[in-house]
Amino acid sequence: MKTIQLSATLRSETGKKAAKATRKSELIPAIIYGGQKNIMISIGEKDMKKVVYTPDVFVVKLNVDGENFDTIVKEIQFHPVSDAILHVDFYQVSNDKNITIALPVVLIGQAEGTKQGGKLIQVVRKLKVNGLVKNLPENISIDVTQLELGKSIKVGDLSFKGYTLVDPMSTVIASVKSTRAARETQPTEAAPQQ
């Protein structure tokens, strides 16, 4: 997985009033949990945008007043109208503890069905995986070259070394649908005469 380093500061005051004051100074209230104790922090708004507004998933190495924490972003709360980031939950990770996280799906190759006039449709953009942080890739690469017209790739068709997929086995990841142009070029059976 990709890593990014960010700096944060400890927060002593909590509650709505303190959170509002934190946001006014272009900082985002946040929490680190999953370790020995929960740590209340504030982090720069500009720094968080590098992590949030990207398709990539990062291990966030947080430097909190000189102390380092390896984390992943577990949850983000957005303002319902302005879409501003209101709060971030970081989950502390370690090399001996499995985590569950959603990774981006990347389709590789040209599907066989597209050569026959079909259209490749990516149904799922992210899949949940479970494994050790050191074993998790930046994304899940899926080869679609053998995918024929009218066929699909499901979670149950895949297996990876070092981590497992958590989504239901029947979840469709990608399929090749027949287009109207492809259907019109296929020979149709003549209707029986009466």
Image (cartoon, helix red, strand yellow):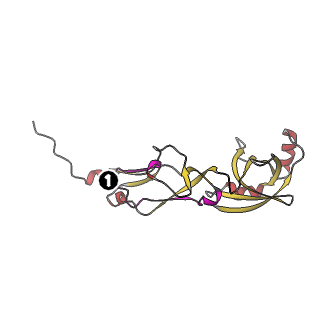
Q: Which quadrant is the C terminus positioned in?
A: top left
The vertical placement of 79 against 118, above or below, is above
Q: Residue drawn at (83%, 50%), measured in percent from left and top?
A: 41
Between residue 15 and residue 160, name the one nearer to us: 160
- Can residue 10 be seen in this snapshot? yes
Going by the image, does 102 lie left or right of 147?
A: right
Q: Characterize the local packing of mark 1: few (<14), some (14-19) or many (20 or more) Cα atoms within 10 angstroms.
A: few
Residue 152 forms part of the magenta stretch: yes
Going by the image, does 178 lie left or right of 29?
A: left
Q: Exactly how many numbered labels are in the figure?
A: 1
- Which residues lie in the magenta part? 133-156
- The residue sitting at the top extreme is 194
Q: Position of residue 121 (x, y in %)?
A: 44, 52
Q: Residue drawn at (38%, 56%), measured in percent from left and top?
A: 147
Q: Secondary structure at mark 1?
A: helix
Q: Position of residue 60 (x, y in %)?
A: 72, 58
Q: Position of residue 40 (x, y in %)?
A: 83, 47
- The residue sitting at the front extreme is 96
Q: Which quadrant is the N terminus positioned in?
A: bottom right
Q: Where is mark 1, residue-wise? A: 181
Q: In the rendered image, which quarter is residue 138 located in?
A: bottom right
Going by the image, does 65 lie left or right of 126?
A: right
Q: In the rendered image, which quarter is residue 144 located in?
A: bottom left
- The residue sitting at the left extreme is 194
Question: What amino acid type is highlighted by mark number 1?
Answer: Ala
Residue 80 forms part of the magenta stretch: no
